[in-house]
Amino acid sequence: MGSTWGNALKISIFGESHGAGIGVVLDGFPSGVDYDEAFILREMERRAPGRNKQSTARREADQPKILSGVFNGKTTGTPICAVIENTNTRSQDYKSLSDQPRPGHADYTGMLRYHGFNDPRGGGHFSGRLTAPLVFAGAMCKLFLRSKGITVGAHIQSIAQIQDTAFDDVEVSAGQLDALRMQEYPILNPRAQDAMLAAIEDARMDCDSVGGVIECAAVGVPAGLGSPMLDTVESRLSSLLFSVPAVKGVEFGVGFGFAEYRGSHANDPFMKTDDGRIVTETNNNGGVLGGITSGMPLLFRTVIKPTPSIAKRQNTLNLVSGQVEPLEIHGRHDPCIVTRAAPVIEAAAAVAITDLYLEGYGYAAE
Ligand SMILES: Cc1cc2nc3c(=O)[nH]c(=O)nc-3n(C[C@H](O)[C@H](O)[C@H](O)COP(=O)(O)O)c2cc1C
């Protein structure tokens, strides 16, 4: 399994949901970056389970223990290793899943890929829990990016059929992204919150789950990062975004909406600001042209599917008996993972942008 990602900055994520712990190694991270512990813990808290009724009852402190790479409050430039202990496991809930793979989860494909030697407890390496180390990596990258004037943030664009207001593709600001990070439900239109929560509660009461869309932006990203064709900004970001479990689609700018546009409407006209910066009037292309950043806000959306483990009875194949049989999933699962996935998407974006930045600017970035 590919568990290492990146060019100038390499991250490697390890662990299983019910093993001793999970963690991440960041190799190539610049030296001299302030280790802002309060910021890191807040980011971990945003993703952590058991914080509200919409989230799984599995409560974990998600406190990263730094084994290396930070000294006297600053990064050293050598590999950063952080581990997070698993403290609240109930492996008996997952006993039958090797025989009865959950529809929509990775029990079947994971077993095939590892010839039955994978750890299936709590979804093993395929668990959403493995996104905690990614959030740690993303938080470290956000600290680096902050020092370069780059801010990454996201909001819940939709849950089920309930829509939030979209980002202004030109005007989205660092202040707005920072404010969203402090909200329990990161949405732009506060009136959407009750309807979203009601949709989640409705699914929960029905022993079911719902999905949604996360819109993410990065502002302050310099123009000229990335490469054409085989190594575009879109492909680099997407490759990391698709490593987030339950992400099934990514679109940049207007994305699939382009299908309904004419060229005259789709194109982003260039212009010069009063202070001499070259910008575009609109930002339908989401800040990327030819695989290279344009200097406009980087904008993309990811769709998060409904949580596959639902309490509702479903049928699945019993691999031992060869019969289709009813499956009852025990375990503790969120009726909607979109809220917890938002900081994960931001983290994936922050890591990818840091990698692109370090590649573009090399050691000058340090
Ligand atoms: C933050 C987060 C939490 C998740 N929690 C759960 C969960 O409680 N139950 C579950 O079945 N899937 C959960 N998932 C999704 C599964 O891990 C994922 O759907 C599964 O590994 C199959 O991968 P795929 O959906 O990418 O194909 C979570 C994903 C994320 C990002």
Image: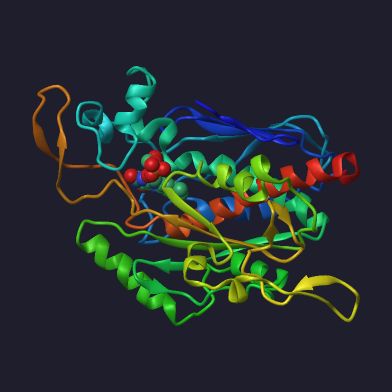
Image quadrant assignment for residue 167: bottom right
Residue located farthest toward the front when viewing the structure as drawn = 263
Indicate the position of residue 114 as horizontal and vertical percent values: 39, 20
44 in relation to 196, above or below: above
1 in relation to 38, above or below: above
Residue shown at the point (25%, 49%) measured from the top left: 310
Residue shown at the point (55%, 69%) measured from the top left: 183
Indicate the position of residue 218 as horizontal and vertical percent values: 68, 61
Q: Is residue 291 visible?
A: yes
359 in relation to 350, above or below: above
Image quadrant assignment for residue 240: top right
- The C terminus appears in which quarter of the rendering? top right
Q: Relative to residue 195, is residue 233 drawn left or right?
A: right
Q: Relative to residue 37, is residue 121 drawn left or right?
A: left
Residue shown at the point (24%, 31%) measured from the top left: 97
Image quadrant assignment for residue 330: top left
Q: Point out the quarter of the image occupied by ligand 1.
A: top left
Residue 310 vs residue 46, the one in the foreground: 310
Residue 95 vs residue 281, the one in the foreground: 281
Residue shown at the point (14%, 47%) measured from the top left: 313
Residue 363 vs residue 331, the one in the foreground: 363
